[in-house]
Image (tube, grey):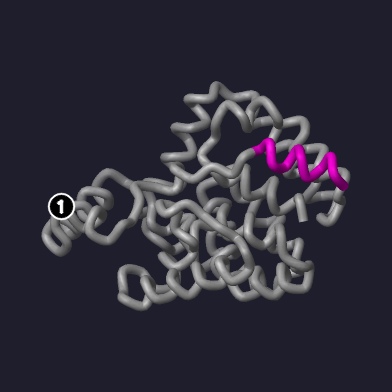
Amino acid sequence: MNTLKVISALLCYPDQGLFEHGDELSAVIRDEAVLPESDQLALTRFIEALCAKNLMDAQSEYVETFDRSRSLSLLLFEHVHGESRDRGQAMVDLMKIYEDNGFEIAVRELPDFIPLFLEYLSQRPEAEIIEWLGDVQHILALLRARLENRRNAYSVLFSALLNLIQANVDMEFIQREVSGESRDDSPEALDEVWEEEMVTFGADKAQASGVRGGPQEVRIPVEAIKVARRTQ
């Protein structure tokens, strides 16, 4: 499903390749037409607005959105296991599923990174896509609600994923819950997290665990989407 490839690319750190192929990404959304028309229009407008920005501004906004806030982390298991040991095993299990199905990723890419997860699903049968996205629909709904609460345009990507599978979630309830949350990306909140991690884990935690620095290091090549569309 190439629409998932497009959403995957849009959830990655913006680069010049994305900006150069914005029209083709929009065409994939329209041609495949697996989303409701309202979502097709919303995604097309998102792509147009994103590609109209200065690249460095777009990159800065991405970092501010996803890299400075744990509540908006694009790592699925961050929202399920946090820093518990269960998170490591869950990633091992997910990596095994990727490998068993012939999906290979670079060593430094975490398997639960949502764009990578969507890239994998884009190669799977529709029934499997619906099942897997259904399993994480509560996380997708939470991210959508938090982004909407911050009036962030990236929310339309999660709306599209939820509508793709006709998710059974109570968005009104989730919105009410989210509206009472404290922001975790304020300078004060970030300082508190930094101090806690320095005391608890020490400076070598990331290196020892093999965890990469941030989700923006992963790239979904836009060229792959172009090739897939030409071969349809």
Q: Is residue 218 among the parts visible in the rendering?
A: yes
Q: Which residue is mark 1?
A: 203
Residue nearest the observer in this picture, 149 or 205: 205
Q: Quadrant of residue 54?
A: top right
Near mark 1 (Cα within 10 A), the count class, few <14, some 14-19 or many ≥20, is few
**The magenta stretch spans residue 207:** no
Count all numbered tags in the image, as a single digit. 1
Nearer to the camera, 209 or 132: 209
Q: Determine whether, in the image, residue 161 is placed left or right of residue 107.
A: right
Q: Position of residue 154 (x, y in %)?
A: 59, 46
Q: Nearer the viewer, residue 96 or 193?
A: 96
Residue 65 in view (yes/no): no
Looking at the rendered structure, the kind of residue marked 1 is Ala
**Relative to residue 24, is residue 206 depicted above or below?**
below
Which residue is pictured at 62% across the width and 44% down the height?
9
Q: Nearer the viewer, residue 202 or 106?
A: 106
Residue at position x 82%, y 38% in the image: 27
Q: Main secondary structure of the magenta part?
A: helix
Q: x, y percentage for residue 117? A: 58, 60
For the point 56% across and 55% down, which residue is it?
116
Judge whether residue 227 is colored magenta: yes
Quadrant where the N terminus is found in the figure: bottom right
Provide the residue span drawn in magenta: 222-232
